[in-house]
Image (cartoon, helix red, strand yellow):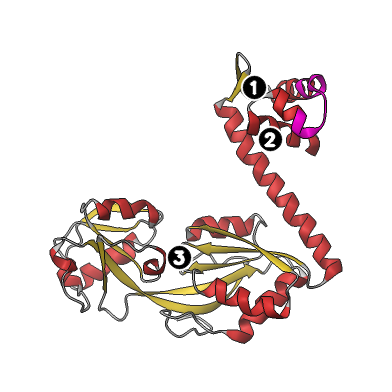
Amino acid sequence: MELKTLEYFLTIARYENITQAARDLHISQPPLSRSLQALEEELGVPLFRREKKRLHLTEEGRYFRRQCLQIQQLLDHSVQQVRQMKQGTCGKIYIGSVGSAGSRLIPSWIAGFGEQYPQVSYNIWSGNTDDVVERMRQGLLDAAVIREPFDQENFESLRVGREPWAVLVKNVHPLAAGSGSLKLRDLAGQRLIISGRRSTEIRRWFADQGLQADVFCEYDQVSSAIGLVRSNLGILICPGSTKDTYSFSDLAWRQLEEGSRSSWLSLIWRSDVRLSPLAETFVTYIKQQLIPADGVEGAEDGTE
């Protein structure tokens, strides 16, 4: 199977039409149709359902498309890295970020780094910590900002900040009133919406104080939980930096008083693969700066 075959398939999948795909690829329709037929024969499954003049991806086709896109991204990244090895400080840096954690850190780094290296461009990808770490393992990112804990095997890391946890409620909820901090006992008996990844930790906060956490829903990414809060279905416990990303007139933010209720943010990069010269320069720049964004408590190196 050749890379060009994958390119043909992705173009057909984008248009769901052989004629339009052929026009985009600047080839005639018959060889493109033969290429698709040969690919399906090689895989042993139909990738499209044919309906009149339209094509529709089958379940196998949708899966194969996702994998091909990942291969294409990895190839593009590899090409960029090869060019950077020659160019030194020109090229693209691929950065990962967990949700809102990098919303202030990454822009400040890019602003400062860009003053020294204006020829550099960036690609930023966001997801939860597990997704970002997996993308790092696949070689699709140079460095990433994640929340601890994470699987540290084959990674180097540098703590770049610490952020408190906060509470988001509907503005008509009784807990929306007031400007002070909330205690865990204020949340006991309330329907809580919490991070599935931090579920054990958050439940332990309550248990350690002899309280019961009434968990109504667990979320993978904060964005998926905002609608529940807006419908007044529960109270969201989330990292404080979320406030910088979401702002609604019908919602209220309250800080969680417990000083220990915070999470470390770390910059990670792979230790089993040599960084490109450009990525290494970027990581070195961050090490030298270590200036946390507003609202993120003092950065420090090492582990607790």
Q: Amino acid at mark 2?
A: Leu
* Label 1 secondary element: loop
Q: Earlier in the sequence, mark 1 or mark 3?
A: 1
Q: Which mark is residue 100?
A: 3
Q: Quadrant of the N terminus?
A: top right
Q: Is residue 83 left or right of residue 162?
A: right
* Residue, disc 2: 10
As helix, strand or loop, the secondary structure at mark 3 comes to loop
Q: Which percent across, then down, holds residue 199?
A: 33, 60
What x and y, as percent, mark residue 109?
60, 76
What residue span does the magenta drawing correspond to? 23-33
Of pointers 2 and 1, the one earlier in the residue sequence: 2
- The quadrant of the image that shows the C terminus is bottom left
Question: From mark 3 to mark 2, how far is it between C-alphas?
Answer: 31 Å
- Whether tag 3 and tag 2 are in contact, CB under 8 A, the answer is no
Residue positioned 49% across, 69% down in the render: 103
* In the image, farthest residue toward the top: 52
Rendered view: 302 above or below 279: below
Residue closer to the observer: 253 or 247: 247
Badge 3 amino acid: Ser
